[in-house]
Image (tube, rainbow, N blue to C red):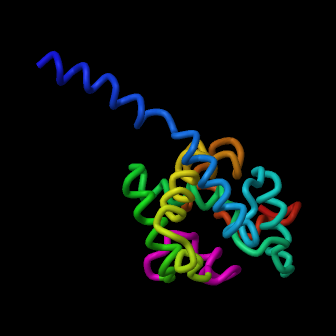
Amino acid sequence: MKKFFLGLTFVLPIFAIPSEELMKKGYEVFKKSCSACHVEYMSHEEIRQVRMRVMKGEKPPIQAPPMNEVALRVKHFYPEEEDFIEFVKNYITEPMREKGVCMPMAFKLFGVMPPIGKGLSEEEKEAVAYWMYHRYEGSWEEMIRKFHGHGRGIHGRGKGMMEKPALQGED
């Protein structure tokens, strides 16, 4: 029994702390294969500005949702690391709207991503998915609250992410 617990103390920290080597490899894969379309990070204010431009009928100034938004959205549906990584590896290899977890407006604005995973090794897919999971902290709900301000919530409570805001003087 003692051996079991001693072994456990050496195994658990490995899973609790992101591997620095895998994080570096994942970031390299992101820069090489993903950053042509996905920016690594956009603040809530920057995302709000993009959405305001889109609501005015302008094209978005970005080619795909920012990676921080993508990662938190995927975590919303796949909160466990192993499930998240498997989803990302599968989706980047065979992306389809039916299995995607993007907001409907993201598909409308950007379409379905190309199958970049087909040009990556299994090791590279694993590394970039691992990097995505560990790079971005927080939750989708928290991001939405920050986006809307004052904790107005998500999906029907407060303004929707792409709902046109009321003009000044309108109620």
x and y percentages locating residue 28 in the rendered image:
67, 57
Q: What residue sits 48% from the left and 81% below the top?
A: 94
**Which quarter of the figure has residue 71?**
bottom right
Q: Is residue 120 above or below residue 21?
A: below
Left/right placement of residue 27 relative to residue 36 reads left
Magenta range is 98-113
Classify the position of the N terminus by image quarter.
top left
Q: Position of residue 146 (x, y in %)?
A: 68, 45
> Magenta stretch containing residue 78, yes or no?
no
Q: Nearer the viewer, residue 102 or 112?
A: 112
- The residue lying toward the viewer, choosing from 125 and 158, is 125
Residue 21: horizontal and vertical position, in percent?
57, 44
Q: Residue 19: x and y, percent?
A: 52, 40
**Is 92 above or below relative to 2?**
below
Quadrant in the picture for the C terminus: bottom right
Left or right of residue 34: residue 120: left
Choose between 106 and 71: the one closer to the eye. Answer: 71
Q: Residue at x 63, y 52 (%)?
A: 144
Q: Nearer the viewer, residue 27 or 171?
A: 27
Residue at (60, 55) in percent of width and height? 26
Q: Quadrant of residue 103?
A: bottom right
**Is 168 positioned to the left or the right of 158 in the image?**
right
Q: Is residue 154 visible?
A: no
Q: Residue furthest top?
A: 2
Q: Work out whether residue 47 can be spotted.
A: yes
